Amino acid sequence: MSDRPSARLLSGDGWQLGAAQRQRYPLTPQALARDHAAVPQWLPAAVPGEPRLALQALGRIPDPYVAAQLEASRWVETRDWWYRRSLSGDLPPGRRAFLLFAGLDYLHAVSFNGTLLGQQPGMFAPRSYEVTSLWRADNALAVRCWGGTARPTYRRSFSQRLARLAAHALLAMDLFPDRLAALACQMSYGWDFAPRLLTCGIWDDICLETTGAARFVRLRLVPQGAWGATRLLLHLHCDTTQPGRYDLSVTTQGLAAGVPGPAHEAALDLPAGASDHVVALDWRDAVPWQPWEHGPAMRYVATVALRQGSVEHDRLAVRFGFRTIALDAAGQRGDALRLRVNGRPLWMRGVSWVPADALFHRLAEGDYAPLLQRAKEANVNLLRVWGGGLREKRAFYERCDAEGLLVWQEFPLAVSFGDHYPREASFLATAAREAQGIVAYLQRYPSLVLWCGGNEFSPRQNRSLVAALASAVARLDGTRPFRLASPWGEDHHNWWVWHAGAPVRDYRRERGALLSEFGLQAAPAVASLRRFLPAAHLYPPRRLWTYHHAQLDALARYAAPLAPRDLWSFVLATQRAQAYGLQVAIEHLRRHRALTAGAIVWQLNDPWPAISWSLLDYYGAPKLAYYVLRRLYAPLLVLLDFPWRRYRAGEALRGTLWLVNDRAAPVAGATLTALLGVTKVYQGPASAPADAAVPVGRLDAILPASGVLRLLLARGQTILAENAYDLAYDDQHRVGLGAALRHWLTWHVLLNVLR
């Protein structure tokens, strides 16, 4: 977590957890000390951690992810909790000591040797406290965490209470919910794929850092250019208790190849307290960081040190990459949505990322790595970090950097249509502080290519809040585009399919330049269902399915064309319907590549065992749609544009064959073959320019049988691309007037008009 190689990580075991009675927030130092002394029992715990995790490890609560056992631990949210540990060791003369907290959840107070260091609401901005004057040979670190139900509630006016009642009665919507009052993980308040699980605790790493009298408070790296003659700007924010002249040294080298880069030495005159400095390094022949499909994800490391004579006061080692990011006009209204990385266009083949665990405190590199590897294996090139979730831990972004995966990062704001986040000065101050902390923490990662204000909220209704986000991006980054919200402009979310019950063929009516949310629920594999549902509740789907977020009416409606009869056929039918829907939408968007900027499927993963829209269930098991997506997101895609319906033997299948090429090189000398079973129904040459979608032939065949149509693009014996069509699925459902009107009111009036 720390950029200082000498930092001591305080995460892991060695901590204790104690329950406390609910207290009002904040507490005076005297009340805090009394509260700590009154803890009746201390239990072993680990950090990062959440009280439920420690209690489950000790057998005091059941696994909250199985059946409805989460209800047995609701009481945890009504208590307050202390974490504590001891620290021993001498602090040499002239050295300074700092405690760095990467993430505290959400209301908290930090004390060191009985002295209150700070208590501020917030979750995403790291906190740093100097403890030099408090240091002893044996030290006591304690963190008080207010339980989840202590979070602030929304103070509603009379008119807001009336609007809340009307929206609930007419649209089944919850306006001005309490979750808007806390800039915390919005998903924790309950979502349509996640449980209401109000967490507290220490959710990210803690480090003890020691420096000399002079230290780097913050190092901001601004790589300029992606190749050829480039520059690296280092913005140094320093602090010293000993003013004077210091020697600054900067060395750079390639992270993988070890190729040395430029070095720099200079003298810095540091005044007492804080000061800012800028160092520029000219760099020749820098290798750019590239998305995985464009080239190697080259990264460098800059090591920056402050010295006086033989005494080193501070040293940082920060990874970075050279690359340029721009958004071009796309779509029918010219919205700036088409992504360019290092000057090359990149069609976004994306998935939405949600926290990989509702108890995200326990997430580590070993949890991120397999999910991100699965995404890359499915030819995904961009992950949209959804605004109802987190600023993820550094291990997530480090892995995206290493894998060449792009990141669209949303601020932690989600679903505020006709309502709005609080407008009080205190809330806006907290939001500004959190936004600045997020930007400063993530600015270094080359994989992060776009900031977004949040998910499904009105920038117009939240003008001051959005201004604070934009200001943080401009002041502490300035190298990436910032979009106000998603959806916004020609960035669309399509929930006409699924939530309104529309047939999946309606995806072909989509006219937005970017479809950044769409999908269908599907049940996870039977083996996964058996891990969290008792045998008696597996089939037919009942209460526990709903408890784990199954929308049973919609599941049954989209599975109906395949006539499921038992658990196995029901699971398969939901997965086939999900895969079919994604195929219709993605092929439509990729075929219109000249007018579109990308597609972002909802959603890659799950935060707990659920029946949801995910491609990978909570246990990491892929659904059928994952394997279909791997074909649909290949840089080379062959597809058939035809009327989507059920086809039977003897019927005519007519359509246009297309070749989509996301690669920098043209495709030539290839042959496209269409097969139904072993019967060849088409064969012809196929070629396409770079970064293009072109028609390559016409299929007009009488089907000898029903089943699966396969397309193969080959050059000689090498298969370049393949695709397949389930001709047995037929969705002829018509949307009722009531559902259509409710959906139109929710998505057109609240989202489009009020924004």
Image (cartoon, rainbow, N blue to C red):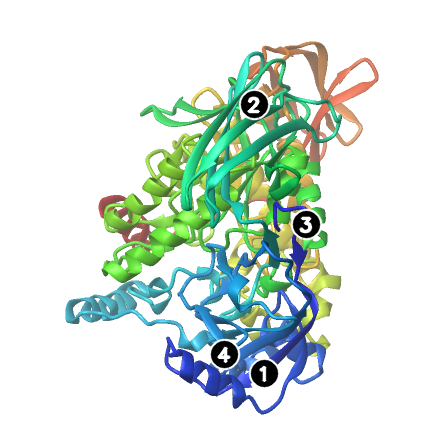
The residue sitting at 47% across, 52% down in the picture is 498
**Residue receiving disc 2:** 655
Mark number, residue 77: 4
**Residue receiving disc 3:** 6
**Disc on the earlier residue, 4 or 3:** 3
Question: Circle 3 sits in a helix, a strand or a loop, which is it?
Answer: loop
Tell me the CA gap for discs 4 and 3: 37 Å
Residue 530, position in %: x, y?
73, 69
Q: Quadrant of residue 444 in the image?
A: top right
Residue 243, position in %: x, y?
46, 43
| Tag 1–tag 3 contact (CB < 8 Å) | no
Visible in this render: residue 566? no
Mark number, residue 400: none
Report the amino acid beneath label 2.
Gly
**Residue receiving disc 1:** 18
Q: Nearest the camera: 524 or 91?
A: 91
> Of the residues tagged 1 and 3, which is closer to the observer?
3
Tell me the CA gap for discs 2 and 3: 64 Å
Left or right, residue 255 beside residue 121:
right
Tell me the CA gap for discs 1 and 4: 14 Å
- Against 633, residue 367 (above or below) is below
**Disc on the earlier residue, 1 or 2:** 1
> Of the residues tagged 4 and 3, which is closer to the observer?
3
Tell me the CA gap for discs 1 and 2: 67 Å
